[in-house]
Amino acid sequence: MATVHAEDYYYLTIVETDGTKTSLTAVGLSLTFSSDKLTLTNAYTDESKTIALSDLASMNFSNNDETTGIRSIQTEESISIEDADAVFTLQGQKLPASAPLKKGVYLVRKGTKTQKLQVR
């Protein structure tokens, strides 16, 4: 087992082959190699990341959080104009329920959920 001290740096940044960067707090960080995967776990912050070694482009220590990219996407059922409780312009103006919508982008609200909707 190798022990590395990076006392002068705050983050270890993982760069994936697609260019996505993930920074994890360096203090308390442990790295485990198992089969074809690398697992990083921080005992103090509950941060963790597992990556296939084939997806790993590089790792570097830095003083800045360099995290980029989308970590996850949550998909929800879209709100239709017909089901919406309210329709707003992007400027926040509430439209009358019977207002015809021109081409453009609107905010539609149903209950506590709000989504963008594009009319073509």
Image (cartoon, grey):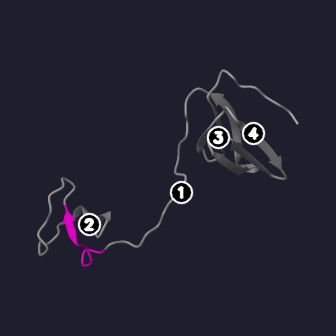
The residue tagged 3 is 15
Residues under numbered marks 4 and 3 in contact, where contact means CB atoms less than 8 Å apart: no
Residues under numbered marks 1 and 3 in contact, where contact means CB atoms less than 8 Å apart: no
Q: As drawn, is 28 to the left or to the right of 22? A: right
The residue tagged 2 is 108
For the record, the magenta segment spans 80-88
Residue sticking out furthest to the bottom: 82
Which mark identifies residue 72? 1
Q: Earlier in the sequence, mark 3 or mark 2?
A: 3
Residues under numbered marks 4 and 1 in contact, where contact means CB atoms less than 8 Å apart: no
For marks 2 and 4, give the one nearer the viewer: 4
Q: Earlier in the sequence, mark 4 or mark 1?
A: 4
Residue sticking out furthest to the front: 44
| Helix, strand or loop under label 2 | strand
Q: Amino acid at mark 4?
A: Ser
- Mark 1 Cα shell of 10 Å, populated few (<14), some (14-19), many (≥20): few
How far is disc 4 from disc 1 in space, using C-alphas?
Answer: 23 Å
- Mark 4 Cα shell of 10 Å, populated few (<14), some (14-19), many (≥20): some
- The relative height of residue 63 versus residue 105 in the rendered view (above or below) is above
Residue 40 picture location, percent across and down = 71, 44
The residue tagged 4 is 30
How far is disc 1 from disc 3 in space, using C-alphas?
Answer: 17 Å
For image coordinates 52% across by 51% down, the residue present is 70
- Magenta span: predominant SS is loop
- The relative height of residue 89 versus residue 77 in the rendered view (above or below) is above
- Mark 2 Cα shell of 10 Å, populated few (<14), some (14-19), many (≥20): many
Q: Earlier in the sequence, mark 2 or mark 1?
A: 1
- The relative height of residue 114 versus residue 19 in the rendered view (above or below) is below
How far is disc 2 from disc 1 in space, using C-alphas?
Answer: 23 Å
How far is disc 4 from disc 3 in space, using C-alphas?
Answer: 17 Å
Q: Earlier in the sequence, mark 1 or mark 3?
A: 3
Q: As drawn, is 93 to the left or to the right of 104? A: left
